Each structure stands twice: as structure tokens, then as C-alpha cells.
Amino acid sequence: MSCCIEFDQAFDEGVIVWAPPQEITDGPMMNQIISEYFLRKPREGGYSYYAINYCPFCGMPRSLAKQGLI
Ligand SMILES: [Zn+2]
């Protein structure tokens, strides 16, 4: 499921996470995008989540919706 080295690195470092949105309970969603991939930003007492449809590094579609899988 990798698109580029940068994505893999960000995923390994926990900057990008994969999770069903309903399972994210340790921080608020910061935008309205429907995706299973999130940029995760540490904040007081938890995280902020920014849903992403596309890889921020190479631009490949990442979410299932944008890959045409759902
Ligand atoms: Zn990529």
C-alpha cells in the first residue's frame, strides 16, 4: 500500500496514521474529508487529526474512496 518513501517514513514515525474514523477517540477531526488516512499532530492531552485523501508527498490517491474502491 506504499506510494513513496516519504509516505512510508511518515507512517513509520506516526505522522500519518491509518484508522477507521470512528475508532479515533484521542483527538478532534480538523477537517471534513472522508478518509482512513490522517495527518496526526500532537497537542495538549492527545492529537489533532487532519484527514487526507491524497499523499502529501507524491500526490497519489490514498483513501479508498479516491482509489475508487468504495
Ligand atoms: Zn506518496
Image (cartoon, rainbow, N blue to C red):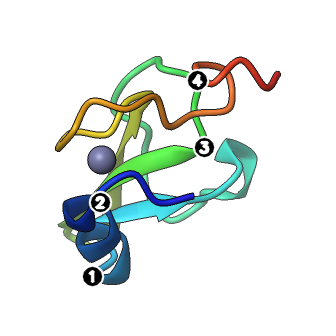
Separation of disc 1 and disc 3 at Cα?
Answer: 17 Å
In screen coordinates, is 41 left or right of 33?
Answer: left
SS assignment at label 2: helix
Q: Earlier in the sequence, mark 2 or mark 1?
A: 2
In percent of the image, x 37 and y 24: which residue is there? 31
- Residue 51 x/y as whole percent: 42, 36
Residue holding disc 1: 13
Q: Earlier in the sequence, mark 4 or mark 1?
A: 1
Residue holding disc 3: 36
In percent of the image, x 71 and y 17: which residue is there? 68
User: Of all residues shown, which one is farthest toward the right?
Assistant: 70
Q: Earlier in the sequence, mark 1 or mark 3?
A: 1
Separation of disc 4 and disc 1 at Cα?
Answer: 23 Å
Depth check, mark 4 against mark 2: the one in front is 2
In the image, is residue 39 above or below residue 14?
Answer: above
Depth check, mark 3 against mark 2: the one in front is 2
Residue holding disc 4: 34
Q: Earlier in the sequence, mark 3 or mark 2?
A: 2
